[in-house]
Image (tube, rainbow, N blue to C red):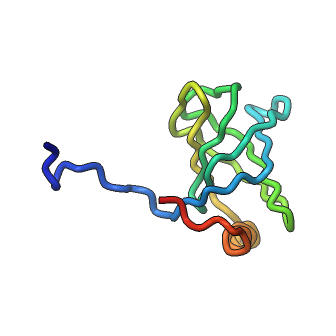
Amino acid sequence: MVRPQYARREQRKYQRYALHPRMTFSIDGGPLIYARCRDISLGGAFVETSTIPLFASSIHVVLDLDSREVSVLAIVRWTGPNGIGIQFGALSARDTHALVAYFQSSKAGPKD
């Protein structure tokens, strides 16, 4: 039995959404890698990809949000056999607005 004080608590600052915007990323200015975004928030995303960058790598991410393209630097925070968890760097006000509008216009609700 896990005591309540030791139970894993959600540490994410932003609500995640089960949305799948088209995306690409590149490592150190290399070729574009097409990937699938499995869930996303204002803070980052889980990216399903067979190309796994090293932990803590800096990557350039481009998200196609239908109405706008968001380009942001991100850090690889964890890696797994099916993909990577990334944390977005500083988002501009326009990019933040585009992401929020994308979340609100989608049919998918917040991810549990």
Which residue corresponds to the image point at 60% horizontal and 62% vertical from the top-left?
42
Above or below, 33 against 39 in this view is: above
Which residue corresponds to the image point at 64% horizontal and 38% vertical from the top-left?
58
Q: Quadrant of residue 57?
A: top right
Q: Is residue 9 left or right of residue 104?
A: left
All told, the count of numbered labels is: 0
Which residue corresponds to the image point at 70% horizontal and 67% vertical from the top-left?
99
Where is residue 79? Give x, y as percent: 54, 31
Between residue 86 and residue 83, name the one nearer to us. 83
Above or below, 94 against 86 in this view is: below
Q: Residue furthest front?
A: 107
Where is residue 43? Give x, y as percent: 56, 58
Quadrant containing the N terminus is top left
Where is residue 75? Give x, y as percent: 59, 42
Between residue 108 and residue 76, name the one nearer to us. 108
Where is residue 2? Give x, y as percent: 16, 45
Above or below, 112 against 105 in this view is: above
Q: Quadrant of residue 64?
A: bottom right
